[in-house]
Image (cartoon, grey):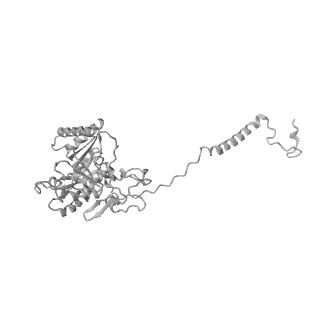
Amino acid sequence: MNVDLNRPLGKNGKRPSLFGNMTAGRWLPPVLVTACIVGLSSLITFTGHQGFRSPAPEPTEPQVAETVPPELASKAPAPPTQNANDLSGKVISPEGGPKVIVVGDPNKRTQDPRTAHIPETDMIEQTPQGALPIIAPDGRRPLDVYARPWSGARGARVAIVIGGLGLSQTGSQNAIRALPDEVTLAFSPEGNSLGRWMQAARQDGHEILMQIPLEPFDYPRVNPGRNTLTVDAPAAALENLHKTMGRITNYTGVMNYMGARFTADANAMTPVIQDVARRGLLYLDDGTSARSTADAIAGQQGAAFAASDILIDATQDRGTILKKLDELERIARAKGSAIATGSAFDITVEAVASWVNEAKTRGIEVVPISALVRDPQNG
């Protein structure tokens, strides 16, 4: 019998060891548990420095730049210490889309596509005739800033300019929706809701022009409409030019609307080309008058200039329009580039949209009109 059973508790006994009288089989599990706990604690401490980090604190929500309503954009002052064209580092929230941080070259000259419908505040001159485009204090021109980017490749290039936007509400909507965004759109001086259609076109990615009503032969029997520039009223010509130019913003240049008599008169054309150049715009001659002096005057005045090679829809027939577009392609392959003009008739829009998609598969690049101008400033 174990003598310990006859001893009073706590009397004449030795101090028990840590594990008492446990046999190896009885004390081994506690030792293993203790070792596991110590080892796990060490592992957690070690790996806390090696990758198993605590979740980073939730970032605070970045402040979103205020969205300027389009109708008030021309009145909003530009930030005094930052180029109004520079969105680099800004947080913006496109309508209906997530917040994004725009990262880019602060010296980039073209507009961000998400704000292409909003005029640059430092490129607007407020006048009695409306908000007119001007060259910014830092030298940026509307021709540069409102231009649609293109690849810069040396292959065959064509620019197609479709005019008459604004004359028909359904026609304007159809043209903006159906035409590939590489096609340049020109707005009629007689159009309605031009601000609305300008914004829609720019948001869709189109480069745009403003058409200027110039005196044709047989005027006023043949009448381009209100604010027509006439040879016999030179004093009113610039005022009428500005009234037309002030109807919309965000365009890279102007093109004639009719004007065979006016463009043939160098004295009448010179002040117009001078004003266009002074404002940093391009001038596009629609190519319908062989007597036009615009090319020579633009060269003299250092204005950015282009002339159309072909009118595609003098005859409203799909087959004829497609043949004209094929001719445009032949000219581009022979010369490197070519320009066509047309109007926003439904049949023209459908034919152009179809042809452009096919031409791309043949290696033809459709570019904005700004890509094909003769521009003294850019050599």
The foreground one among 118 and 136 is 136
Q: Quadrant of the N terminus?
A: top right
Q: Is residue 327 visible?
A: yes
Q: Residue furthest bottom?
A: 128
Q: Is residue 166 visible?
A: no
Figure disc tally: 0
Q: Quadrant of residue 81?
A: bottom left
Q: Residue furthest right?
A: 12
x%, y% of residue 108? 39, 51
Q: Residue furthest front?
A: 300
Left or right: 32 as drawn, with respect to 55: right
x%, y% of residue 316? 16, 43
x%, y% of residue 99? 42, 51
Q: Residue furthest top?
A: 25
Left or right: 56 as drawn, with respect to 98: right
Q: Quadrant of residue 335?
A: top left
x%, y% of residue 346? 20, 45
The foreground one among 48 and 321 is 321
Say which residue appears at 76% left-offset and 36% top-offset: 26
The foreground one among 150 and 260 is 260
Say which residue appears at 30% left-offset and 44% top-offset: 367
